Amino acid sequence: MPDRRQFLRLAGGGAVCAATAPLAACSSALPPEATAAWAGPGANETDPRRWALAHAILAPHSHNLQSWLVDLRRQGEITLFCDRERLLPETDPLSRQMMMSQGTFLELLALAAAERGHRAEVVLFPQGEFAPDTIDGRPTAQIRLVPDAAVRRDPLFAQVFRRRTNRFAYDAARAPDPAALQAIAAAMAPWPEVRAGFTDPRDTAALQRHRAVAVEAWRIELTTPRTILESYRWLRIGPAEIARRRDGISLNDPMVRALSVLGLFDRTKAPTPDDATTTGQLKDFNAKIAATPAFFWMATEGNTRTTQVNAGRAYLRAQLAATAQGLSMHPLQQALQEYPEQARTYADIHTLLRAPRPTHTVQMWTRLGYGPAVEPAPRRGLQAHLLAA
Ligand SMILES: Cc1cc2nc3c(=O)[nH]c(=O)nc-3n(C[C@H](O)[C@H](O)[C@H](O)COP(=O)(O)O)c2cc1C
C-alpha cells in the first residue's frame, strides 16, 4: 500500500476525497454488509451444523481467502474441502498455510459445536492426506456433530467475536504480561505436537534478530514482482469492492481509494523497489516492527498435512487466548514461506527459533503486544461456502 504522505503529494492534498467522492463516502469504516457475518447465526438457526459453521467462517485465514467449502448432504455430518480456486501459489507454494487455515476453521467449528452441547468428531483426510507439495479434490475433514451431555464448553468461545488480526503498531513500552504468555501456551495444550515460543523481553539481542528477519522477509516479498502481484490480486479497495467481494485484504483509506479511482495505483503492475509505493510501505512496516515488544511462534517436529492442520487448530486457540488477555497478534508469514527468494530468511528464522531443518518447521510467527482496537475483517457469509445443502 502506498505511503499515505505520498498519496497526499500525488493526489493533491486532503481535498482529493471530496473531489472524487461524496463526503459521506469518505469514511474508512468498512461497509456493514462486508462484516454482517460477525453478527453470528440468527436466533432461529436450528441446524447445529449451520450454527457451528456460521461461527467457523469467522476463523482467521491467510490473506482472508476463506478457502472453506462444506458439503452438508450427509445427515448430521459436514465434509470440509479446501477451495482450490482460492490458493496462494506464489507465496504459499506448498499450501502449508492453506492447511493451517483449514485447521483454524475446524477448531472454531469444534468450539462452537461444544457451546451447543455437541462433540465434533473430526476425521482428517478421510480419503488420505494430500501430497506434501500439492493439494487435490479430496476432503480435508469429515466432521460428525454428536449430541453429548458431557461435552465441556470452552471459555475461549467467549473471544470468538472479539478476535482480530491486528496490523497496527503495538505499545513499544509494554511487554506482554508473563501470566498472559502462560495462558496462551496453556490454551494450545490440546495440540501437544505444536510447541509455543515467546521472546524474552530482557533479551534485546534476540528481539533485534527477530526484527531484522521480519524486515528483510517483508522487503523480499514486496520487491519480488510475482509475490507482490499475488497480494494485489487479493486487495479490495473501497466500499463497493469490499462489499461485493467480502474477502482478501481491505483497503478503505480515503486516500488509497482516491488514488485507485484516479488510476494512480495500478494493481496489475508490480512497483519497482524504489517506487514510493514500496518504500513507503517498507517504512511503515519497519516502524511497526521496531515498536514490537514481543514475538510469538509455533514450531512442530515433522510437517505432515495433519501436523499443518493441527498447527492451525493450535493457532486459533492461541489467538483467542491472547484476545482474552488483551493482547494482539499479527502473523509474519513472509520468512516462513517456501518460495526460493525467501530461502535465506527461512533458514535464519529456523535457526533463531531453534527449529532445526529439515526435521522441524516453524508454522507460525507473529508480532505480539498491546494494540489499538481494530474492526472485524470481511466475511462472505455461510451461503458462499455451501457446496450442496
Ligand atoms: C496461516 C495464516 C497465515 C497468515 N499470515 C498472515 C501474514 O503473513 N500477514 C498478515 O498480515 N496476516 C496474516 N494472517 C492473518 C489473516 O490475514 C487474517 O486472518 C485475515 O485477514 C482475516 O482477518 P481476521 O483474522 O481479523 O479475521 C494469517 C492467518 C493465517 C491463519
Image (cartoon, rainbow, N blue to C red):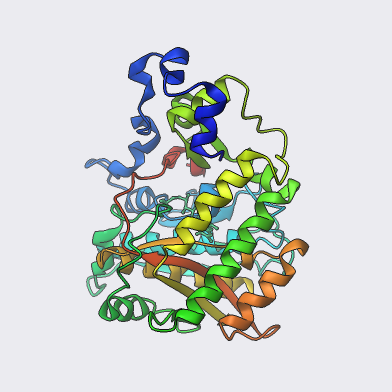
Q: What x and y, as percent, mark residue 88?
A: 66, 51
Q: What x and y, as percent, mark residue 39?
A: 28, 42
Q: Is residue 362 above or below residue 137?
A: below
Q: Quadrant of residue 274?
A: top right
Q: Is residue 388 visible?
A: no
Q: What x and y, as percent, mark residue 109?
A: 39, 59
* Image quadrant containing the N terminus: top right
Q: Is residue 326 visible?
A: yes
165 and 21: which is toward the camera: 21
Left or right: residue 58 versus residue 81 is left
Residue at image position (61%, 75%) is 349
Residue at image position (70%, 50%) is 223
305 and 227: which is toward the camera: 227
- Check the image and name the residue furthest to the right: 340
Residue at image position (57%, 71%) is 308
Left or right: residue 9 versus residue 315 is right
